[in-house]
Amino acid sequence: MTLSKNKIKFKLILSLITLFTIFCFAISAFSAGTASINEQIEQLRSIIDSSSYSAFQSRMILNTAQDLLESGVSFEDTKNIIENSVEKSLDAYSMKKVFDVILETQQEGLPTEPLINKVNEGFAKNVNNSVLISVISNKAENLKKADEILNEALQEGLEINGEEEIVKVLADSMENDVPQESLSWLLKTGITEGKSIKEISEISEELSYLSLMAYDSGLSSEEISLLFKKAIENSTNIDEICENLQNSLDAEISTAKIEEGGTAKPSTTTDSGTLPTSSTGSPVEVGETPTQEAGEAPTETGSGPEPSTSPTEEAPSPPEN
């Protein structure tokens, strides 16, 4: 009986020792993590001190940077943004806005890599502050919409592997003005047909290409949405949608694009969140024939207008009484 009590006491002591050890390791790991973030903040502080930001602005940026690090955004990404901001003379409030957009996206569980890539692209192209913020804000909104498409498919019981990757792909297509409804159909139909994420991604990229082609042809957003809707209605599977959309686009270019009088519709531009780049001339349309300038329409003969008859010649005089 005494031996049994001793065993119980020994097991109890052993359990307490184990719990104490785990607790110590947890405290140690937490302290190491805190120390690591503090060290990283000090590195960021030294970069900001080399700028012209005021003491208040520096503290504001560092506080937001710490929030980013604690939320899981990598130190290297945070450091690169600060370094580029200082180098490109990005004002402190614009930098905080960039950080806020990334932080909100991270906290919502969405991928932040596309946003960080856009920021780096903006710095490389020397875009102004307002354009940079507009672009990444638009990108963040597209990521949210893509996540909505994904969640709708999951709620319908569809099993999807590579959720983060598909969100990125769908967001990219929306940036190229592919309608959200079309992408939702693409994802649900593709998963139902057993298509891989890679196959769905390839078709999504092709839809982006066709959408941009439609805009280059001068079609409006409403006309493009209608083209996509008709292509979906005429497609029994996702392998057909691109071909149907191309056929519809060809028909639209050859008929609806030419306005009365033979004048082509002017090209439209989109606010899709794409960073500005140098543009080239508009593409030559297939089947388009040159027209003469207004007021110079050709005639079959070079003769002038026939002389008009006078009123007296048109009707005889009344008879005299």
Image: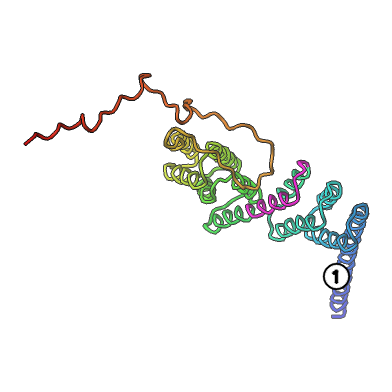
Three-letter amino acid code at the position of disc 1: Leu
- At 48% from the left and 25% from the top, the residue drawn is 290
Q: Mark 1 — residue? A: 19
Q: Residue furthest bottom?
A: 1
- Secondary structure beneath dot 1 equals helix
Instruction: Say which quarter of the image contains residue 32.
Output: bottom right
Q: Residue furthest top?
A: 302
Question: Can residue 109 be seen here?
Answer: yes
Task: Name the one closer to the observer, 150 or 65.
Answer: 65
From the top left corner, tell me how far across and down residue 47 is, in percent: 91, 52
From the top left corner, tell me how far across and down residue 183 is, in percent: 54, 48
What span is colored magenta in the figure? Answer: 124-142
Q: Is residue 253 rendered magenta in the image?
A: no
From the top left corner, tell me how far across and down residue 308 is, in percent: 28, 28
Q: Residue furthest left?
A: 321
- At 61% from the left and 41% from the top, the residue drawn is 198
Please state if 9 lies on the left or on the right of 176 as rendered: right
Question: Can residue 192 be seen here?
Answer: no
Please state if 33 lies on the left or on the right of 134 as rendered: right
Specify the principal SS of the magenta part.
helix
Q: Is residue 103 above or below residue 122?
A: below
Packing grade of label 1 (10 A; few <14, some 14-19, many >=20) is few
Rendered-image quadrant of the C terminus: top left
Instruction: Say which quarter of the image contains residue 147.
Output: bottom right
